[in-house]
Amino acid sequence: MSKLGLIIKREYLAKVRNKSFVVMTFLSPILMVGMIVLIAYLTKINDSETHIVSVLNESAYFHGDFLPGASVSFIEFKDIALPQAKDSTVSLSYDGLLHIPASADLESASQAAFLYTKDNPVSEVLNRLEDIFEDRLRKNRLSHLGVSNEEFSTIEKGYELQTATFDGERNLKGINELKAFIGGGFGYLIMMFIIIYGGFVMRSVIEEKTSRIIEVIISSVKPFQLMLGKIIGNSLAGVTQFAIWIFSASILLFISLLLLDIDMAALGANPAMQSGTMGAMPPMPDGDSDIQKYANELFKIPWLLLLFSFVIYFILGYLIYSSIYAAIGAAVDNETDTQQFIFPIILPLMLAIYVGFFSVFSNPHGPIAVGFSLFPLTSPIVMLMRLPGGVGEGGVPLWQLVLSIVLLLLTFLAIVWLAAKIYRVGILMYGKKPTYKELYKWLKY
Amino acid sequence: MTPILVVDNVSKSFGGHTALSQVSLEIPKNCIYGLLGPNGAGKTTLIRIINQISFPDSGKVYFDGEPLAPRHIATIGYLPEERGLYKSMKVGEQALYLAQLKGLSKSEAKKRLKYWFERLEIGDWWNKKIQELSKGMAQKIQFIVTVLHEPKLLIFDEPFSGFDPINANKIKEEILELKQKGTSIIFSTHRMESVEELCEYIALIHKSHKILDGKLSNIKKAHKNNVFKVGLQVNGEGEGLVNELKDKFQILDHVFDPFEKQLDFTLKLPTADTTEALALLAKKANINHFEETIPSANDIFIQTVKAKGE
């Protein structure tokens, strides 16, 4: 076996045999699925709760308007005074008391109406009541104007501008966001991978320094071989962990959803909650034909190209960042000294994610999106968000994709070369707290 | 016979700091060569250049007559001063890994490790983790890993630090046996007295310069300063005798014990010729001992540095 192979094997085994790594590998999916199931379950319980509001209507209006709904139902009090009504509402532990005093007309009745509650009113109750009043008032005002309900509903119909490309292909609203969202998923995966497993590489370098084995090793192999072996070994361990996570999490999720009888639609209702910082899914317009169109559009996403580019951007992006991590590990003596160097690494990654989600969503081919998808430290994430639109006409111009990859490749070579230099010097330096100035000097050794 | 290693006019600097300036050495085959000098003199830098961990700014290194090349790594064994092992790895696994990195096949490495583990009586450590071992125990494993691939040239940087006297002695014996088998050995240390007895050749390095090198016995001969330690059995007053001798010789210091009637003093003669002094002393008293003081490497070092006006 070649020396590089030996190093990769050792790094891989050292990582996957590590107790905390094993624990994380098997615990994370359980925690993740547990969270999702818990959220879904709580949402389900929350949804099934009905609020009861008592109504004391002393006016001549609104009778028959308070109909029980999905989450709010009403109980009408009759022939009692307001204080008694309040008391009984409290003693019956209803959610609130709506009081409509006797008034001359509908408008003043609604102006004088009050909702009494124990604390601040539940928004569901408040919204429902406001809807009822609004509906009734509108009807009243319309009839004053002599417009029938049917006539009004024809007026109220919304308008949507239809769009198409110059070739006559119909466009769909929100498809840009949806596509960027899919690409963003890949980009997010790259970022997470870099942050988690880049840190592994760094800690592994620091461990070699503190255990003082480094000089023994590099009297047998070149420092660059050791660095490369370390990066590859740790990333293979990372891929293993990711694969186990995805596989076991999907099985667990499937089983628990089946057991707890939670509808997948209930999950779909709260995408913002599950995806955390990833933002909410764009709204899906109604109608079967539209869904069909979206499905068609999703099929049109060049999956093969996307997957292929993902692999390229993933490998190059990860290698760039993890070699910087390795250089940092070599420069310091312990993990507490790494903070000042870590922040500048994470910054472009964060920038890529946020710029991506803000500017690529609204305009995948605008100047900001193009700029960030060419800049090598952000391109792995931002370009992947743009790519689901395809390459060529209507999508990413081919020259941009090629230029982006070429720039990334050049940066990769330059960064690995620089990192290897810092690494080579740093691993043999003990007891020095390095500054940026010091690191710059090392480049010239 | 070609020397195992020739260092030819090697210089190396880091930024503004000069670590080695125009150092030349010749290390003969099958000898123990002491690389001596205080901390920070440049010994480790020179050793790292020999191990191709770093490279000289100028000058050349030849290994067994050939310019130093990556393939020579497999024929050099190096025990660095800053040494350690992976803490969470098992002893056997780790030794196998390091041996394979030096180019041994797995089966060959296993066979040799078994031999060495038995030889140093640590056979039952194979499945232990390094963190369960004491510092001295870990040092034994590092020693084995250093010599396992039967290198032609062994380099030990401060080899005995961390060993208790018994194990240090054991390692010393192993090193001597390796030399018997034809290995060339470089010792690097700042504690000059510790390896003086082992070394046939030495080089002194001071502030990045080589200030002295050669065969130890020749160096010592060259640095003899005709100082003798003398012990006399006197009858009567010792101080009187000292004053009498002071008229004729240079007496550096003296001690007189009136009970034992023993006078000890240090005598410096103008030449190496001792006949006149001995004849005179023999007339005055019984000579208990008369011995030439051989300067230690440390003395020679201090002398040489002083002579260079530093």
Image (spheres, grey):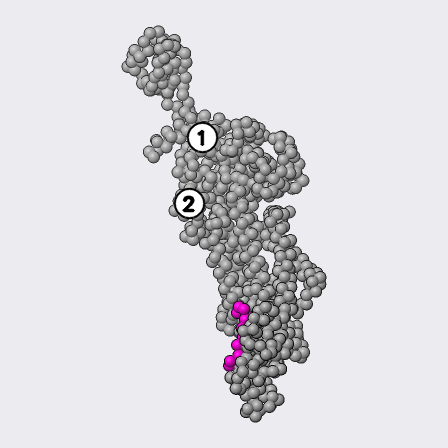
Q: Give whichever of A289, B258 is nearer the camera.
A: A289
Residue B290 x/y as whole percent = 40, 15
Q: Which residue does the image show at 49% across and 62% down from the upper left?
A: A348
Residue at image mark 2: B13
Is residue A124 in sight in this rendering?
Answer: no
**Residue B227 in magenta?**
no
**Residue A119 in magenta?**
yes
Density class for disc 1 (Cα within 10 Å; few <14, some 14-19, many ≥20) is many
Residue B125 x/y as whole percent = 63, 35
Q: Which residue does the image show at 42% across and 51% down from the upper left?
A: A435
Q: Are marks 1 and 2 on the same chain?
A: yes
Residue at image mark 1: B192
**Which mark is nearer the camera, 1 or 2?**
1
Report the amino acid beneath label 2: Ser
Magenta stretch: give its range.
A111-123
Q: Find numbered disc 2 in the image and state the secondary structure of the residue it sits on.
A: strand
Disc 1 is attached to a residue of which chain? B
Q: Which residue does the image show at 41% across and 52% down from the upper left?
A: A437
